[in-house]
Image (cartoon, grey):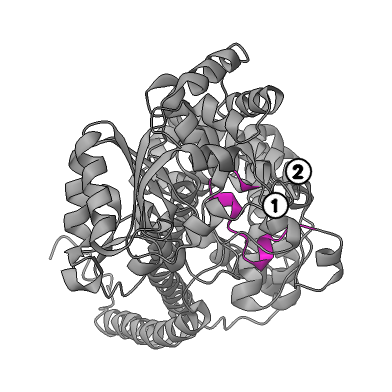
Amino acid sequence: MTETEFLLWVRGPALQIATIVFVLGIVVRILQMVMLGRKANLAEARGSALAGGLRTMVTRSVPDRGTFQRSTFTIVSGYIFHIGLFVTIFLYAPHILLIDEVFGVSWPALPTPVVDATAVVTIIALLAVLIHRIKDPVMRFLSGFSDYLVWLVTFLPLFTGYIAFHRIGLSPPMLIALHILSVELLMVVFPFTKLMHTFSLFIARYYNGAIAGYKGVQS
Amino acid sequence: MSKDETLGEALRRQGVTRRGFLKFCAATASMMALPPSMVPVIAAALESARRPSVIWLSFQECTGCTESLTRSHSPTVEGLIFDSISLDYHHTLQAASGSAAEAARETAMEENHGKYILVVDGSIPTDNPGYSTIAGISNRDMLEDAAKGAAAIVSVGTCAAFGGIPAAKPNPTGAVSVSDLVHDKPIINVPGCPPIPVVITGVLAHYLTFGTIPELDDLKRPKAYYGKSIHDRCYRRPFYDKGLFAETFDDEGARKGWCLYKLGCKGPTTYNACATVKWNEGTSFPIESGHPCLGCSEPGFWDGGSFYRAISTPTEDLSKAAVYAVGAGAVAGVALGAMNRAKKQKSVDAHEKVTIDDLDKEK
């Protein structure tokens, strides 16, 4: 298989396979979670479950002072790499082009030097997060194989994207192919790991808030 | 023109001034990234070089590569150097035909055994030898025969270098490149559809000056010309960096000369000298005239998807796959969910209430 054939395979059949696994996996996981259902609460409602749920979706996204003081590093680095991922994935011209091609929607891109700088910051934040995970005894104790796998498949697309943009080490077709392949790896791993938090995060926050809201207490 | 004439004599006889000649040497040195001190060395070497014997074999090709070399509008030093080499066999250009032509090739191969430069354009069919023959000799036999006595082989054009269009899917003739068949000779690939003429003369000048082949990349292309991508050297690159793209061939962006990435430009993955050396005596190159780069100097460029689709876009239909996946996922998800519920119900049904009596240890 030549480089060009590899790139074509990665852009074609491999991407198709990854998309199918990704979409199918997510739909299955979400349906499974939703269908587990909740026991009917027979107590009289003392507040609005809906309002409580919606409020908590917002409040839990902003760290309270106590939590922030206790885990400043986790929160700051977490915000940095999540925002960084958003910028590099959704505001980089070739990526928007891909989204336009698949979904038919597009928006303006950020200038490439801005995205480039964001990528560097994001890579540094992800490395810091990994070092913290390894160095901190509690974090290390709580981490299993899937935590490191999740870190790796998040890190690889950023890293390969960065070296592909700057053409470091390999030929450009190979770099682009490896970058796309790393994203496909992420897509395949996604539904079956903690990466599912992208979808379950706000569902869970709503759920917690709704319970409290029904009881008429703060959450 | 006598065969013993040196290149310098031949150029002077054709009216090339010393100034023009040195300018060419300086340009060649700078293009090949050699220090300025090498200019006199190149000049001296080219001056005194005996005209090298060149045998040019044309296989499955369109003659575009030959056209590229010979159709310069005014005689350039590159063109004259090309004219001055002892082109002992080139079945498109030579006056002789039939057995006389083949005899010229065989004589040149014998007289200059081990010294001649073999230039090949066109791919070689390996399926049925009858697909392409010259004077009844199959391309493969002729190549292998001529390669034995060659000092070096220059594969001119993408077909000779990588198989090119004849090797494009479904490759009906089993076409392959020169380097697929010849493994024991130094091969210089000069890909492009067609390649830039000055690259060929630059390679010849390097060979005449140093007696060696220039530094090559992993695809056997001279690094001096194929070391940088079109994208890296493109004058429209600032628009790419700013995120300014032409969306169609006649929108405002196209008129303002913005980046052609979205129109399928293969510049980022294509290594060639078009953006710096340019075409038609430095007039322009495809991107300058508003058309995206096709990536013609890369292997398999013909099979690399549409010329007009950006390289970051998928080649297969994803939305259909996604729709099917949603459908299949919904069915599987509901089924699994139902199974989970059944399991839950079963455990609820199987649940036996523990009474205070059950816990009484005395019993």
Location of mark 1 (residue): A87
Find numbered disc 1 in the image and state the secondary structure of the residue it sits on: helix
Q: Which residues are magenta?
A: B258-274
Crowd band around label 2 with a 10 angstrom C-alpha radius: few (<14), some (14–19), many (20+):
some
Give the residue at x 63% y 63%. Answer: A205
Q: Quadrant of residue A125?
A: top right
Give the residue at x 48% y 56%.
B66
Position of residue B168 relative to residue B299, above or below, is below
Locate residue A206 relative to residue B219 in the image: left or right.
right
In the rendered picture of this protein, how many numbered marks are placed on residues?
Answer: 2
Q: Which amino acid does the dot numbered 1 rest on?
A: Val
Q: What chain does badge 1 belong to?
A: A
Instruction: Report whether residue B212 is seen.
Output: yes
- Residue found at x 63% / y 15%: B36
Q: Farthest residue toward the top?
A: B37
Locate residue B171, reporting x and y percent. Answer: 30, 72
The reply to whether dot 2 and dot 1 touch (C-beta < 8 Å) is yes
Q: Which residue is mark 2?
A: A114
Q: Nearer the viewer, residue A118 or B340?
A: A118
**Figure quadrant of the N terminus of chain A:** bottom left
Numbered mark located on residue B233 in the image: none
**Type of amino acid under label 2:** Val
For residue A148, side relative to residue B252 (left or right): left
Q: Position of residue A175 (x, y in %)?
A: 47, 46
Residue B313: where, in percent of width, then height? 56, 67
Quick check: is B307 in the magenta stretch? no
Dot 2 or dot 1, earlier in sequence: 1
Would residue A79 appear left or right of A20 to someone viewing this image?
right
The one of B117 and A81 positioned closer to us in this rendering: B117
